[in-house]
Image (tube, helix red, strand yellow):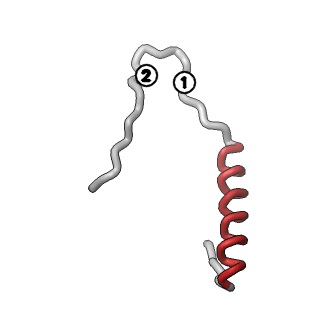
Amino acid sequence: MHAELVVPNLEGFKLKPYVSFRTDVEIEKRRRTYEAKVCGSLNITIFTA
């Protein structure tokens, strides 16, 4: 099984796709919150580079 990306055809569309730089901040905040809950209750430490 493989992942399939379904994206619209933007040919001729005048606006450009946009993703806010704040998105990364929100994702990281959610990840840290999740890891604190899960790893804290299991006494696990996750090291990231």
In screen coordinates, is 22 left or right of 13? right
Which numbered circle lies on residue 3? none
Callout 1 environment at 10 Å: few (<14), some (14 to 19), or many (20+)?
A: few
Examine the image and state in which quarter residue 44 appears: bottom right
- Number of callouts: 2
Tag 1, which secondary structure? loop
Quadrant holding the C terminus: bottom right
Question: What residue do we see at 62% from left, 73% from top?
Answer: 48
Which residue occupies 66% across, 45% down? 23
Tag 2: Cα neighbours inside 10 Å, few (<14), some, or many (≥20)? few
Q: CA distance from mark 1 to mark 2?
A: 9 Å
Tell me if residue 36 comes above or below residue 18 in the rendering: below
State the residue in front, 27 or 38.
38
Rendered position, 38 above or below 15:
below
Q: Amino acid at mark 1?
A: Lys
The residue that label 2 is drawn on is 10
Instruction: List x then y, in percent, for residue 20.
Output: 66, 38
Three-letter code, disc 2: Leu
Q: Residue furthest front?
A: 41
Q: Nearer the viewer, residue 7 or 33?
A: 33
**Quadrant location of the N terminus in the rendered image:** bottom left
- Residue found at x 72% / y 71%: 36
Residue positioned 69% across, 57% down in the render: 30
Across and down, in percent, residue 17 comes to 54, 29
Location of residue 46 (image quadrant): bottom right
Query: Which residue is under mark 1?
Result: 16
